[in-house]
Amino acid sequence: DIQMTQSPSSLSASVGDRVTITCRASQTINSYLNWYQQKPGKAPRFLIYAASSLQSGVPSRFNGSGSGTDFTLTISSLQPEDFATYYCQQSYSNVWTFGQGTKVEMK
Amino acid sequence: QVHLVESGGGVVQPGRSLRLSCAASGFTFSTFSMHWVRQAPGKGLEWVAVMSDDGTQRYYADSVKGRFTISRDNSKNTLYLQMNSLRVQDTAVYYCARGGGATLDYWGQGTLLTVSS
C-alpha cells in the first residue's frame, strides 16, 4: 500500500501567520492527492482535490501544490476557524490511504 | 443537499460480529462509489473500504481484509459494513463518505463502535 507521511505532526501558530504542511507519498501518485480539515468531534471536511483545486466554498487562503510524491498545503493567513487537524489522502491506488494528520494549534 | 447518516454502532465483545448502515439522501446514490473510513479514539483517519456505484468492485484496507465486507442496496439508498471477528483495535468512529470522483466529498457524522470484553 502507498504510505503517506505528513510533517510536522503538529505546529503552533498565531492568527495571521502563514502555515505550511507537507505530505510525502511512498511512490508517485501523480496529482491524486486530497486534503481534509477536521475539528474535534466533527466529521472531516473536504478542502482540496487533485493536489491544487479548491472545493467549492473553501476560502482562497487555502492553497495546495505538488505532484508526484511531494505535496504542500499552505494557509496564507491563518484565521481563528482554521485551528484544526489537516489530513492528506491519496486516491491513486485502489486502496486509499491517509497521512497521519497535522494538528494546527494556537500559539 | 447530500445527507449521510450512519447507524448500528455500539458495544460488542471481541470475536463477535456487527453490521453498520449508512442511509444516503439528497443525491442519486446508485451513481456514486461509497466508502467507509474509521477513526480510533484520539487517532487519525484510516480508510477502510470502498464499493463501486454498481457494486461490482470492492477494495479493502489490509487491516480489515477477510473480516469486513462492504455492500450496498441501491434500491434502499443504503451502504453497509459487515464486520466479523471484531478486535479491540477495531474500536473507532466509523464514517461513511461519498466517493466524488477521486475524493471523499461528503461525510456522515459517524457511528461509534466499541469492542470490549
Image (spheres, coloured by chain):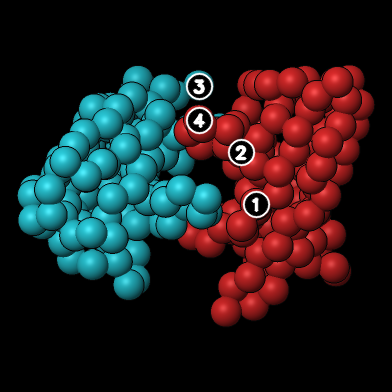
Q: What chain does badge 3 belong to? A: A
Q: Nearer the viewer, residue B86 or B56?
A: B86
Q: Which mark is residue A1?
A: 3
Say whether mark 3 and mark 4 are on the same chain.
Answer: no
Residue A6 horizontal side relative to residue B98, left or right: left
Tell me the mark number nearer the camera, choosing from 1 and 3: 1
Q: Residue at x 28, y 60 (%)?
A: A81
What residue does disc 1 label? B110
Circle 4: residue type = Lys
How far, Cα to Cα, is label 1 from label 3? 25 Å
Say whether mark 4 and mark 1 are on the same chain.
Answer: yes
Residue A102 horizontal side relative to residue B97, left or right: left
Q: Quadrant of the N terminus of chain B?
A: bottom right
Colour used to depict chain B in the structure image: red
Q: Are marks 4 and 3 in contact (CB under 8 Å)?
A: no
What residue does disc 2 label? B38
Circle 1: residue type = Gly
Q: Farthest residue in the right direction? A: B16
What residue does disc 4 label? B43
Residue B68 in sight:
no
Q: What chain does badge 1 belong to? A: B
Say whether mark 1 and mark 2 are on the same chain.
Answer: yes
